[in-house]
Image (tube, rainbow, N blue to C red):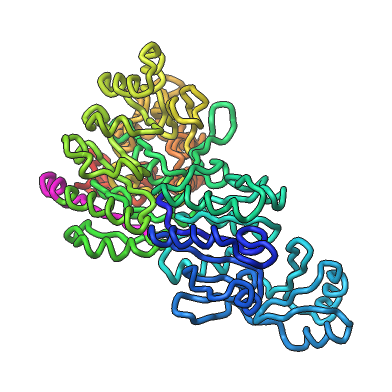
């Protein structure tokens, strides 16, 4: 991700005994000159901060009183929460507790904590206690540094996923956790250092200045620990969860046509969106429209013309917004022409604003096979997710920047050779060929080369999606299973015909087979078990199970029509055969 925002704690981090380090002040000025937004995030009462630091215009915004008070570039201040009622301060006075009072925060010595807590309990107030070295802070419920920073970043249209935070004490944990990259100074809290992505080594605030100069000289954020924000791929053969660190890496999803590539890509997109990342998904075939059910997602195109570029840009200037550009109704040549303008726009937008955080290109071989790829893709910032069944057609420069590869079932010899070459494992060709060709509908592999693979080919069962996949509505019905997953119709234990390896074949077989064959399967619950275990479509499995149950109870005699109708409704199959067993096989709607 691009580095856009620097969030700095004050006391103990950039200030000693309340005085801002002059070298840090100079480094902040240099960072702002480079376009970095600098926010001061402090537990100090705002009036005391002004008295200690002077004019606060040396930063772009201030979050004071541990997140409760915000001051913006125009000088206006606002409260994040309601201040404690006056009766609380009166009670503290009555008990002889010395304290300082801000607009929302009340501060006392840490030794006063038992008496302060007693007052809160007696008055039944929604207040919380927070320790900061030798001081005690009393705050309204729900107030923290991360909340205050989030409010400021939202108003400035910036994202915490483009931010670095630096802090030193107990009240900085949530600040570091909220930002994409968290730094703890080594002269501060040991517990904070254990949670940080990086530890700033030095002997006091003066050491922060060179660190600021170092990180602001780079366009990209440093790589974090990798375990704070992760994407859940599924479950490995050893039964352990397989996850990927979010980071700004270039990922590739490859596999045969209709093998489930866009299903995997949608799984990753869902998780990124729900973690607050901004995406632009270039949807060549209309497979990602259902992402619109997630917060902040806007879909353009489809039945309508592709969006004007300024419209895409306006939406993506908001850090919690994502865009799906559906080009499924656009002719191939027009798609290429449109992408030749859209991809450079996205690259420029990310360089200027840091948004979107990730760019997803489906059917990438359509657009990234010509020598002009460096004009279309930002090789420096990265964070692309490319999806293709023709990996070998991608330009060699694109293949070189891929850092992680997830593969669905792959049978094409040329594509397997390309995968072997990219992974540097030519000697395992026969082994890989067998594994890749035998992947089930709900399986994929993570190739060696990325840290999470452990240096091996990691086969795993995919996690469930949060949103309905569009292929359920159109193309999924013709997805061909491996032979062992097909439904085998039997008559008294003897197989009848070839296994049904697609839903279309299954429905067609229902039409042609005698009721005596269907009867045995329905009474055993074979149909619903197959749908649930192989397709992992538990909604359809439940519907089919109900049909089987009603049939066993004698309430349904038209078994074929009931089963076919369940699949029709779920997958929008043609209804030309409805009610008749002697008409044409079911086909997919165009």
386 vs 486: above or below: below
Q: Position of residue 234 (x, y in %)?
A: 51, 37
The stretch drawn in magenta includes residue 34: no
Pick out the residue farthest to the front: 22
Pick the front one: 188 or 179: 188
Q: How many marks?
A: 0
Position of residue 502 measured from the top left corner of the image (x, y, whole percent) = 33, 34
The residue positioned 66% from the left and 77% from the top of the image is: 48
Magenta span includes 335: yes
Q: Is residue 389 left or right of residue 370?
A: right
Q: From this viewpoint, which residue is outermost toward the left?
A: 333
Residue extent of the magenta highlight: 322-337
Q: Is residue 175 visible?
A: yes
Residue 201: name its quadrant. Answer: top right
State whether residue 555 appears in this view. Answer: no
Horizontally, is 337 left or right of 380 in the view? left
């Amino acid at each position: 991700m691009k580095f856009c925002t620097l969030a700095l704690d004050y006391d103990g981090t950039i200030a000693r005994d309340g005085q801002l380090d002059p070298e840090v002040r100079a480094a902040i000025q240099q960072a702002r000159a480079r376009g970095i937004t600098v926010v001061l995030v402090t537990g100090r009462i705002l009036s005391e901060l002004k008295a200690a630091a002077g004019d606060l215009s040396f930063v772009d915004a201030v979050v004071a009183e541990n997140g409760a008070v915000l001051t913006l570039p125009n000088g206006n201040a606002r409260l994040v929460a309601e201040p404690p009622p006056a009766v609380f301060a009166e009670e503290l006075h009555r008990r002889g507790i010395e304290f300082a009072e801000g607009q929302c925060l009340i501060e006392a010595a840490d030794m006063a904590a038992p008496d302060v807590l007693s007052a809160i309990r007696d008055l039944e107030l929604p207040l919380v206690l927070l320790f900061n070295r030798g001081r005690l802070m009393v705050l309204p419920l729900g107030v923290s540094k991360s909340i205050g920073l989030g409010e400021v970043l939202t108003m400035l249209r910036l994202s915490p996923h483009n931010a670095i935070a630096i802090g030193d004490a107990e009240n900085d944990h949530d600040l570091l956790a909220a930002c994409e990259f968290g730094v703890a100074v080594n002269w501060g809290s040991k517990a904070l250092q254990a949670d940080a992505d990086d530890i700033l080594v030095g002997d006091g605030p003066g050491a922060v200045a060179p660190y600021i100069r170092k990180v602001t000289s780079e366009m990209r954020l440093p790589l974090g620990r990798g375990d704070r924000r992760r994407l859940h791929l599924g479950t490995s053969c050893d039964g352990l969860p397989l996850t990927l660190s979010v980071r700004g890496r270039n990922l590739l999803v490859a596999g045969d046509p209709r093998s489930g590539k866009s299903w995997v890509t949608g799984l990753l997109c869902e998780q990124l969106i729900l973690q607050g990342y901004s995406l632009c998904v270039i949807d060549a075939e209309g497979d990602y429209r259902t992402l619109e059910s997630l917060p902040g997602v806007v879909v353009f195109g489809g039945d309508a013309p592709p969006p004007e570029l300024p419209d895409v840009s306006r939406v993506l200037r908001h850090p919690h917004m994502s865009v799906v550009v559906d080009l499924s109704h656009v002719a191939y040549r027009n798609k290429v022409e449109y992408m030749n303008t859209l991809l450079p726009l996205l690259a420029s937008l990310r360089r200027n604003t840091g948004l979107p955080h990730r760019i997803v290109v489906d059917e990438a071989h359509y657009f990234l096979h010509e020598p002009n790829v460096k004009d279309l893709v930002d090789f420096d910032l990265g964070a692309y997710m490319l999806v293709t069944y023709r990996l070998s057609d991608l330009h060699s420069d694109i293949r070189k920047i891929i850092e992680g590869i997830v593969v669905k079932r792959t049978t094409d010899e040329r594509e397997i050779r390309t995968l072997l070459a990219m992974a540097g494992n030519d000697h395992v060709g026969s082994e890989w060929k067998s594994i890749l060709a035998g992947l089930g509908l709900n399986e994929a592999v993570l190739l060696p080369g990325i840290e999470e693979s452990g240096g091996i080919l990691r086969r795993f069962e995919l996690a469930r999606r949060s949103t309905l996949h569009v292929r359920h509505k159109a193309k999924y019905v013709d997805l061909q299973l491996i032979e062992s997953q097909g439904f085998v119709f039997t008559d008294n234990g003897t197989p009848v015909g070839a296994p049904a390896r697609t839903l279309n074949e299954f429905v067609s077989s229902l039409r042609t087979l005698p009721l005596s064959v269907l009867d045995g399967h329905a009474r055993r619950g074979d149909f619903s078990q197959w749908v649930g275990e192989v397709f992992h479509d538990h909604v359809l499995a439940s519907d089919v199970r109900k049909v089987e149950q009603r049939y066993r109870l004698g309430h349904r005699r038209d078994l074929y029509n009931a089963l076919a109708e369940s699949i029709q409704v779920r997958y929008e199959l043609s209804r030309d055969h409805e009610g008749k067993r002697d008409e044409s096989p079911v086909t997919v709607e165009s």
